[in-house]
Image (spheres, helix red, strand yellow):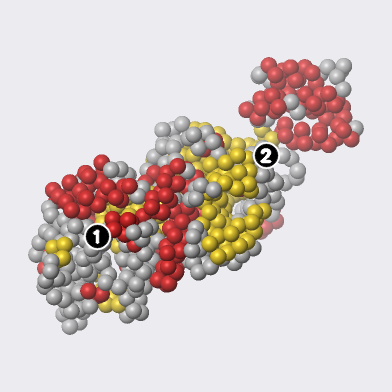
């Protein structure tokens, strides 16, 4: 803030006592931070975080800017920051956060006296302007630096009258001298920013390949008379190997609790039921229990524990649906009627999302007894955590008070920092983002409805940069409630396009069972699958479809293998959108520099996707190669990780993608033919 003397005096303030809000060198707009800075920004273990600040000063002296990053164990490291956008005074340093817990960081800025002298000397000495003065100033700075022998030798050389000014400048430019001085900068006017917190969570909070299935459908059998026998946790466990073989590491289960009988929904969300209709798992609660019970058809708590143990052996974490709502038969309805909304006619309000009506579900009223409801919710979460559940997909969190979630998530994550919450919040941006800000580790997103090149480019830029400090999207390609027109009418190409986009653009992505079988028929007038699994059993012939070549499972497997082999794809903040001459050819890259990659090599991938499932597209792709660690005019070999084909590429490249064959390139940069350049 600039405060003029006269303005301060006119306000009756003694200028000598005024405390400026800026340091001697302004350091502003530090990132990552959450909007409003009410809660710490977030990262996950192994994430490369871009730390940024706007730093400038008056005049033309050179600045030094450093990031000071302190891990939860109190160990601090200093990283030099670099200017990233000429003319904006924006500086950045990328650093890997490798330990879970609360980190702190701040920015230190100073006048770099050596760099300032060197800049002037490189201009003046060749021009023979102020030569003696420049040499004297250089000698004094070297004497001030002292310490290491190479600096002392340089200072002695500057004092040697037998050496010319040009020779002395060459000594100053020696990389060893530069390196020695950079290790202990000659700083003045040193200014530090405020200290900022960064919450680092476990890797699964930001990285995962999710698969969803209904356990009651896995192993369900239909008799000749049309009646069904439900699948169980034991039969569903037999499907786990196939899920693991496809490379998925999180299995999400819809609610596993007893289902109410009152107003039970029949097939396709009708109010007409026949004996044996299983009802919606989201209509939770019956005489068999509520949110801390399992449906008797699925088995017992012991059977659930067996299922979790089998998944764990295969490297799969089980995510459990947590839906705070009730069937009219839920024990809470009689035990805690104050937890619901009673209408003037004495009835309890059921859930509605006009024109949709959910007569089988009572929403919770969180204002009548907030302390009682919160205590019960915390008890339930602790109960399932005690059974080995460390991930919860929360149903419709945007229909509950934000303050409620802030308190609950804080308490649970303080006690159990390893627990991950995914917000199923397809809602307005303010609520969607705020849920992430108060503590949700992951969020459903608008990806499902972003289909065109421009829509996807804008969306990918947003999730990778604008909101990445607090919102981690999980890019589900479909859900039991969402079968978009793109999938309904795009055929097999649409399914491959959406899977390729989700698996490569996001650090977490997800698939609901049936996607790999191209289930694309919607209930008329809706975006939901006909014969929706929410209301009935689903029997699928997985093996038969794959044998007949009618399964996308091999493609999903390939995508997950690529993700496993390329750590750049498991980062969120490293996506950059590039250009093509075609309105349907989307181009983006992901890059992980060697210094941040555990195997010590650059990991650079170029994705080119034909987002039109009905055509063959040809175009020229234009790349900013500096975004993937290369010189602007480099040439290099790329290998298509889908087909295995190899191509020679550069800045501008011809691409032809047939939606009916392979609609996407996932290209790995193999052998740069020119020196690489740090990003």
Residue at 70% in and 51% down? 87
Q: Quadrant of the C terminus?
A: top right
- In this rendered view, identify the residue nearer to me: 669 or 89: 669
Local crowd size for mark 2, using a 10 Å CA cut-off: few (<14), some (14–19), many (≥20): few
- In this rendered view, identify the residue nearer to me: 222 or 473: 222
Using the rendered view, name the quadrant where residue 63 is placed. Answer: top right
Q: Where is residue 647 in the image (x, y as percent from the top left)?
A: 60, 48
Residue at 46% in and 56% down? 500
Q: Which residue lies furthest to the right in this view?
A: 128
Where does label 1 land, which residue?
A: 214
* Kind of element beneath mark 1: loop
Query: Is residue 16 visible to us here?
Result: no
Where does label 2 land, which residue?
A: 674
Q: Where is residue 65 in the image (x, y as percent from the top left)?
A: 62, 39
Rendered view: 365 above or below 571: below
Residue at 45% in and 42% down? 565
Local crowd size for mark 1, using a 10 Å CA cut-off: few (<14), some (14–19), many (≥20): many
Image side of residue 310 versus residue 118, left or right: left
Disc 2 or 1, which lies upstream in sequence?
A: 1
Image side of residue 248 versus residue 31, left or right: left
Rendered view: 377 above or below 364: above
* Numbered mark located on residue 440 in the image: none
* Kind of element beneath mark 2: loop
Q: Position of residue 556 (x, y in %)?
A: 39, 53
Rendered view: 603 above or below 383: above
């Amino acid at each position: 803030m600039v405060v003029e003397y006269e303005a301060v005096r006119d306000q009756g303030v003694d200028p000598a006592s005024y405390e400026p809000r800026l340091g001697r060198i302004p350091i502003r707009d530090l990132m990552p931070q959450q909007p409003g800075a009410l809660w710490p920004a977030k990262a996950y273990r192994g994430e490369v975080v871009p730390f940024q600040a706007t730093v400038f000063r008056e005049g033309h002296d050179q600045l030094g800017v450093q990031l000071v990053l302190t891990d939860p164990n109190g160990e601090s490291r200093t990283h030099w920051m670099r200017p990233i956008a000429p003319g904006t005074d924006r500086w950045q340093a990328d650093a890997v956060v490798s330990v879970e817990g609360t980190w702190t960081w701040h920015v230190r800025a100073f006048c770099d006296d050596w760099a300032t002298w060197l800049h002037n000397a490189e201009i003046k000495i060749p021009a023979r302007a102020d030569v003696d003065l420049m040499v004297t100033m250089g000698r004094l700075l070297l004497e001030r630096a002292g310490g290491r022998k190479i600096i002392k030798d340089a200072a002695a050389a500057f004092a040697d009258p037998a050496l010319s000014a040009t020779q002395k400048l060459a000594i100053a430019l020696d990389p060893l001298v530069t390196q020695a001085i950079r290790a202990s900068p000659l700083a003045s006017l040193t200014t530090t920013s405020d200290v900022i917190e960064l919450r680092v969570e476990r890797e699964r909070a930001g990285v995962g390949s999710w698969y969803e299935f209904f356990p009651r459908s896995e192993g369900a059998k239909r008799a000749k008379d049309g009646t069904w026998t439900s699948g169980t946790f034991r039969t569903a466990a037999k499907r786990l190997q196939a899920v693991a073989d496809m490379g998925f590491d999180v299995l999400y289960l819809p609610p596993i609790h007893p289902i109410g009988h009152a107003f039970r929904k029949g097939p396709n969300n009708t109010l007409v039921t026949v004996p044996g209709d299983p009802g919606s798992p989201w209509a939770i609660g019956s005489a068999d229990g509520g949110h801390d019970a399992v449906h008797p058809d699925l088995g017992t708590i012991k059977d659930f524990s067996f299922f979790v143990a089998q998944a764990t052996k295969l490297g799969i974490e089980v995510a459990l649906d947590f839906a705070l709502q009730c069937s009219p038969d839920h024990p809470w309805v009689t035990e805690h009627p104050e937890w619901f909304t009673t209408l003037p006619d004495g009835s309890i309000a059921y859930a509605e999302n006009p024109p949709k009506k959910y007569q089988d579900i009572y929403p919770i009223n969180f204002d009548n007894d907030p302390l009682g409801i919160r205590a019960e919710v915390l008890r339930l979460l602790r109960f399932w955590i005690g059974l080995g559940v460390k991930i919860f997909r929360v149903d419709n969190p945007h229909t509950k008070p934000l303050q409620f979630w802030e308190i609950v998530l804080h308490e649970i994550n303080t006690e159990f920092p390893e627990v991950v919450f995914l917000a199923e919040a397809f809602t307005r941006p303010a609520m969607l983002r705020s849920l992430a800000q108060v503590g949700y580790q992951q969020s459903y997103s608008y990806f499902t409805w972003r289909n065109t090149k421009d829509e996807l480019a804008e969306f990918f830029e947003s999730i990778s940069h604008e909101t990445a400090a607090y919102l981690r999207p999980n890019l589900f390609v479909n859900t039991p409630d969402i079968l978009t027109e793109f999938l309904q009418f795009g055929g097999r190409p649409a399914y491959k396009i959406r899977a390729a986009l989700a698996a490569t653009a996001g650090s977490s992505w997800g698939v609901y069972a049936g996607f790999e079988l191209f289930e694309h028929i919607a209930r008329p007038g809706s975006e939901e699958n006909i014969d929706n699994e929410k209301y009935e059993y689903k029997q699928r012939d997985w093996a038969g479809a794959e044998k007949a070549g009618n399964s996308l499972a091999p493609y999903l497997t390939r995508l997950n293998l690529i993700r496993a082999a390329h750590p750049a794809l498991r980062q969120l903040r490293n996506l950059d959108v590039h250009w093509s001459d075609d309105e349907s050819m989307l181009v983006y890259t992901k890059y992980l520099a060697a210094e941040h990659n555990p195997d010590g090599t650059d990991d650079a991938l170029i994705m080119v996707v034909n987002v039109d499932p009905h055509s063959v597209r040809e175009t020229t792709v234009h790349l900013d190669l500096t975004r993937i660690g290369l010189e602007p005019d480099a040439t290099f070999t790329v290998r298509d990780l889908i087909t295995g084909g190899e191509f020679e590429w550069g800045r501008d490249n011809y691409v032809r993608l047939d939606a009916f064959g392979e609609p996407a390139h996932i290209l790995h940069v193999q052998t740069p033919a020119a020196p690489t350049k740090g990003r």
